[in-house]
Amino acid sequence: MIALSLAQRLAGHVQHLLGDGPFPQPGGWTHMGAVICDASFHARCAYEATLRPRLLRLQKDWPDATTVRGFQGRLATEDLAVAMHFNHSQKVATAHAITDLLAGNGVDTRDDLHAWLDHRASQAALRTVKGVGPKTVDYIGNLVGRSQVAVDVHLRAFAADAGVPGLRYEQLRVVYEEAAVLLGHDQGGLEHAIWRYKSGAA
C-alpha cells in the first residue's frame, strides 16, 4: 500500500510536469559495440553532448563490431580509449569485461542479449563486473529494447521533487513501475521522458 501511494504521488507529478504523453520507448542500439560502450561509459557523463556522438562515430568506424564477437575482435587489436576518444581506464576495463562475459555465454546479437537478460543468473553475472550495478543492468536492458526503469540521479531527483522520500534502488524502481501502470505508459518510455526532462535534453 505504501508503494502504491508513492506511485500515485509520482504519477501525479508526471502528469503535472510532462502531461499525458505519449512517451515512446527509446530505440537503443542494434550495434553491440555501441550497447557495451553505452553501458560502460554513460555514468557521470554528459550523454547528449559527449557520449552519444562518440557512439555514433564508433558504429561508423567499427561496422564489424555490430556483434559481440566482432567487437571482441576489434578490442583485441585496437585501443578502445582511442576509438571512443574517452581516456578513462576503468570504463574501458568495464567494456572489455562485459564483452568477455557476453562472449563467454554465447551472447552475440541484440536479440541474444535481450533473451539472455530474462534470467536472474544472467543479471547476477553482469553484476560481478566491476562498474556494473543494478542500474546498469536495467540500463542495458533498455539499450536492447526490454523497456525497464533504470533509476539514475535524474530519476531520483524527479522522485524527490514529487515528495517520494529516499528509497533503495529496487524500491524506487518498483514505485516508478507502478506509476507507469497507473498512467498507462510504457515503463521505458516513461523513464526516458523523465530523464530527458531532468537532464535538460528535452
Image (cartoon, helix red, strand yellow):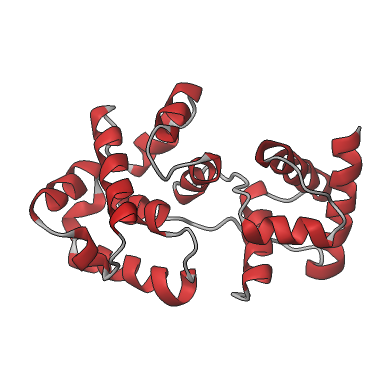
Seen in the picture, residue 81 relative to 127 is either above or below; the reply is below
Q: Left of 146 or right of it: where is 63? A: left
- Image coordinates of residue 176 in percent, x first then y, are 74, 46
Q: Quadrant of the N terminus?
A: top right
| Horizontal and vertical percent position of residue 186 | 67, 49
Query: Along the line of sight, which residue is nearer the eye, 21 or 108?
Result: 108
Which residue is drawn at the image coordinates 68% and 57% (left, top)?
155
Residue positioned most to the front: 89
Q: Residue at x 19, y 41 (%)?
A: 69
Closer to the camera in the image, 198 or 20 = 198
Q: Relative to residue 170, is residue 54 drawn left or right?
A: left
- Name the residue rendered at 80%, 58% in the picture: 160
Residue 182 at what x, y percent from top left?
Answer: 83, 45
- Please tell me which residue is depicted at 85% across the width and 37% down the height of the picture: 3
Residue 189 image point, x, y percent: 64, 55
Residue 36 drawn above or below residue 1: below
Say above or below: 97 vs 83: above
Looking at the rendering, in which quadrant would you find the C terminus? Answer: bottom right
| Residue 113: quarter of image | top left
Q: As drawn, is 96 to the left or to the right of 157?
A: left
Taking depth in this image into account, of 167 and 180 the one nearest to the observer is 167
